[in-house]
Amino acid sequence: MKRLIVFIVVLAHICVATAQINTEKVMVVGRVALNYEDYVLAIRYFNQIISAKPYLYEPWFYRGLAKYNLDDYAGAEADCDQAIKLNPFIENIYELRGLCKIQQKRYEEAVTDYEKALTFNPENQSVLHNRMLCRIEQKDYDQAEREVDTLISKWKDNARYYAIKAEICMLKKDTVRGAEALDKSLELDEFNGPAWASRAQISISHEQWKDAEEQLNKAIHYIPKYVPLYLNRAMVRYKMNKLRGCLEDYDVALSLDPNSFFAHYNRGLLRAQVGDDNNAILDFDYVLKLEPDNLQALINRATLLQNTGDMRGAIRDYSKVISRYPDFYMGLYNRAQCYRRLGDIAKAEMDEFTLMKSQQERHLGIKHQRRKVARPTRMYSDEDLERYNELIVADDEKSTVLQYESEYRGKVQNIQADIDLRPDAKIDSTLLSQPESTLHTWDKAILCYNRANALSAAKEYQQAIEQYNEALLLDEGLADAYYNRGLTKIFDGRTDEGIRDLSIAGERGLFRAYSVIKKYRK
């Protein structure tokens, strides 16, 4: 008997030792999966360790890192919280949690995490870098500039820090210092396309067209598929009266992005300017397909149709504009001309009478409209009808400043997003006839789950959520219930709550939940 007891004790020690070795091996395999960017597989391994030894901080941290790369920022933050509870002295955990908060636009909280990480390692470059970017997002430009100056003092040959300093200076409307910082950045790295693009923006703001064209040429050389660069260069060439080059730039822009509103609109104007009316009409047809109520495009197309002899088409477009602006002088005059060419003298005279009355009222000061000074370009939102034939630019210029990525980045697994409810759980049909009080807890949970699915499919979202809640009270391991409750909350407009439920479903093995999180996180 004593020998048997000794044998059992020895066997127990062997099992414990084996479990310890297996845990270490699983940790290594999980980290390998993480390094190979197979985040879903990594989560499976770290789940095993957390289940066996929930008191270790590392699997919580690494699982959070995997979730972060699957865009499950709330789930990653929750794992970081747990890791910090278990070991509050690891800088990387605070760094990752800061990144999660940045992705959720909680920049002040991210700064707090970064400052905590810096107490362990004041020279952590990525932490200093990300904290400075948070200052920019908070619009605390003075503090952001001080922090980027600190980075420059520590890493003098880092070209991108001068580029960021330039961005901050431009946000502060200081283009002179911004140009100096960009020149220094390009001195260190002349192959930086985004820096050349930013330098060109400064030259454009100073109307230095020749310099801007040369700088955009270099930017395009290094970033040949970035559409805004061609749009900007086309505008610069237009200012320099290089219409052929301008048209070529719009052609390239449309070959890269066939749906570019600005390229179609401006190319249509330029084609009309050089007498290519039929092709100009095609461009405005596309513009109006994208924005059927764009009055400026309607006027331009109406003018072109009138020039090419399509009077009925021109009348149609002029009428749409006049219905909104009844005293539009040019529209009334041109529509009257179109009616006369069609032989409809009565309608022509009616437009001419309306036009004459409008002119008299203007002369007497009634409905007087101040004419704006014409400029060769106008902002997109400017709806001054007298500027219908001028090139347009975006209200907010497209940024060509370098976008800075954090060090925690990776390719998200190519998982097919599935946004349908999980199928009903199986239940023995004979149980449906039994009183609910006599059913096993598992069967009750499945009944609630199936009711919830039916209610959710019927768009009775609040009642469905209550039934999912009931199912999870009865069986908290029912991963499908978390998944479906998450989707139901998203359908009900409670996206953040739904994503949290989907994160739990992912932890419990429904890994396609991460592709749904990615879809709705956008």
Image: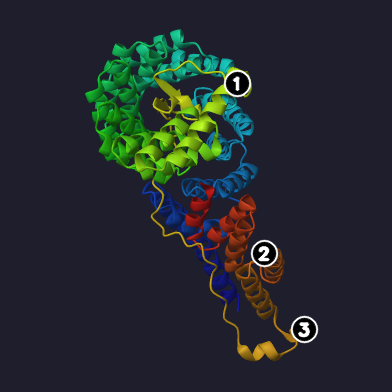
Question: Please, what secondary structure does the residue beneath circle 1 have?
Answer: loop
Question: Please, what secondary structure does the residue beneath circle 2 have?
Answer: helix
- Asked if residue 508 is positioned above or below residue 126 in the image, the reply reads below
Depth check, front residue: 388 or 206: 388
Q: Position of residue 463 (x, y in %)?
A: 71, 67
| Precedes in sequence: disc 3 or disc 1 | 1
Is residue 410 visible in the rendered structure shown here? Answer: no
Circle 3 residues within 10 Å: few <14, some 14–19, many ≥20: few
- Asked if residue 209 is positioned above or below residue 360 in the image, the reply reads above
Q: Kindly report the distance in space between the C-alpha atoms of the residues bearing marks 2 and 1.
A: 55 Å
Quadrant of the frame with the N terminus: bottom right
Q: Kindly report the distance in space between the C-alpha atoms of the residues bearing marks 3 and 2.
A: 26 Å
How many dots with numbers? 3
Question: Please, what secondary structure does the residue beneath circle 3 have?
Answer: helix
In the displayed structure image, the side of residue 119 where residue 464 appears, left or right: right
Q: Kindly report the distance in space between the C-alpha atoms of the residues bearing marks 3 and 1.
A: 80 Å
Amino acid at dot 3? Ser
Q: Quadrant of residue 135 in the image?
A: top right
Depth check, front residue: 396 or 365: 365
| Precedes in sequence: disc 2 or disc 1 | 1
Q: Farthest residue to the right: give it.
A: 437
Checking the image for residue 461, the label placed there is 2
Residue at the spot of label 1 = 368
Q: Quadrant of residue 53 in the image?
A: bottom right
Residue at the spot of label 3 = 437
